[in-house]
Amino acid sequence: MVKVKAAVLEEFGAPLSIQELELADPQAGEVLVRLEACGVCHTDLYTASGADPSGYAPAVLGHEGAGVVEAVGEGVSSVAEGDHVVTLFSPQCGECIHCKSDKTNLCLAIRDQQNKGYLPDGTTRFSRDGEPIRHFMGTSTFSEYTVMPEIALAKIDKEASLDHACLFACGLSTGLGAAINTAKVEPGSTCVVFGGGMVGLGAVAGCRLQGAERIVAIDLSDDRLELARGQGATDTIVGGPDAVEQVLELTGGFGADYTFEATGNVSVMRQAVEAARMGWGLCTVAGVAGKGETLDIVPRLLITGRRVAGSSFGGVKGRTQVPQFVDLYLQGKLDVDPFVSHRLTLGDVNRGFELMEAQDGIRSVIAFG
Ligand SMILES: NC(=O)c1ccc[n+]([C@@H]2O[C@H](COP(=O)([O-])OP(=O)(O)OC[C@H]3O[C@@H](n4cnc5c(N)ncnc54)[C@H](O)[C@@H]3O)[C@@H](O)[C@H]2O)c1
Ligand SMILES: [Zn+2]
Ligand SMILES: [Zn+2]
């Protein structure tokens, strides 16, 4: 048992509260992780605000963590004390029917308990004076320490700085994977990315790594379009109602081989479908739409050869592929520094939400120290 400082969602719509909690020892198949860094993401805010119908409280939020293994429970063999790890809200058990297929990354092993805020055995390790405090996304990384299932930790090279590595826990891997795994962008192709946040910028980088010849970035913000150029975008367009027309103009009237949507806005998803080329254009949707919203597509677009795919965590099998992405960063093939816009302390986590709402920078990263 350790005492930890953590950011607790106590009441929906209210700021997170920094509290001291008890954290029990890791049980069989579990690992105690000391967090070094954690990104602040829209999904944390979405739950904190109360907009997520499946949210629960009290809970320790946070899911974009990177840290060091401090202790392991019984039977844990793939990570050991001192290893550096990235936390995975999307685990990889390696044994379920989905893990055994190369068609999906949606591991089935611990979904039900994770969605309810419990570790796989149906209990919590966090508590406050004996009252259980639930986990969030199986990660709960807004805390000095957390306990997680072994199958939800990606062991990475110790050379990687953890305040950069934490970005691979969510948005960056989602964008990279959308291009590399879901779309499987081919060399020489033309790609269009709608949205220039963490996910869209990751998709731009993924298209570049796949050898795309032309990468068009679309966003409402000039700053973000500039960042997209830094990641390999060859053309930029300011988003709006005529974005599809502009893509058609840039592509000889046909549209792009691959389009990506990373805004969460269903009208932009529609644009992304319409901007895909007839014959073989593939639209990959990564944005998360609001509850109850639907995507409107004219069926003729599909009959004439366009396809639509969705991508959760970029189709990334985290334990296998996150370490590979981190290696690309260490080899200098991925420039992640421009994504870390602010460094905060855990006590400033609500400031991280404010910066995000103001679209100030790409990511605020909490440094535990
Ligand atoms: N599929 C997954 O597993 C997964 C993982 C993480 C995030 N997401 C989702 O991906 C989406 C993007 O996440 P993010 O962190 O990059 O968000 P973000 O808010 O930082 O970025 C969204 C960008 O879209 C731009 N945008 C808004 N309207 C636009 C328009 N009409 N045309 C072009 N651009 C427009 C905004 O200017 C902004 O830069 C969100 O919906 C998020 O929930 C999905
Ligand atoms: Zn996230
Ligand atoms: Zn699995």
Image (cartoon, rainbow, N blue to C red):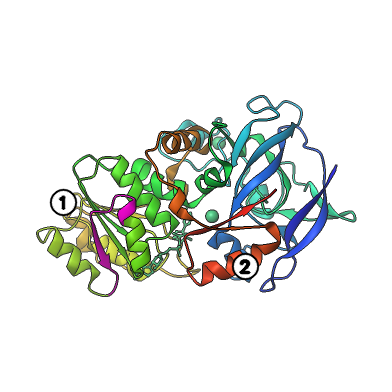
Q: Earlier in the sequence, mark 1 or mark 2?
A: 1
| Residue 291 position within the rendered picture, expressed as x and y whole percent measured from the top left | 50, 68
| Residue 142 position within the rendered picture, expressed as x and y whole percent measured from the top left | 68, 54
Q: Is mark 1 within 8 Å of ligand 1?
A: no
Q: Is 319 drawn above or below residue 214 in the view shown?
A: above
Q: Is 155 drawn above or below residue 44 in the view shown?
A: above
Mark toward the viewer: 1 or 2: 2
Q: Is residue 38 left or right of residue 294?
A: right
Quadrant assignment for the N terminus: top right
Which residue is rendered at x = 18% and y = 42% of the image?
188
Q: Which residues are magenta?
A: 229-240
Label 1: how many Cα within 10 Å (few below 14, some 14–19, many 20+): some
Q: Is residue 137 left or right of residue 358?
A: right
Question: Which secondary structure lies at badge 1?
Answer: loop
Instruction: Identify the residue position indicated by label 1 in the image.
Output: 279
Magenta stretch contains residue 185: no
Label 2: how many Cα within 10 Å (few below 14, some 14–19, many 20+): some
> Any mark on residue 190, and which?
none
Name the residue at the left extreme: 252
Magenta stretch contains residue 237: yes
Using the image as rendered, state which of residue 251 and residue 288 is in the foreground.
251
Residue 208 can be seen, yes or no: yes
| Residue 230 position within the rendered picture, expressed as x and y whole percent measured from the top left | 33, 52
Count of picture labels: 2
Instruction: Identify the residue position indicated by label 2 in the image.
Output: 351
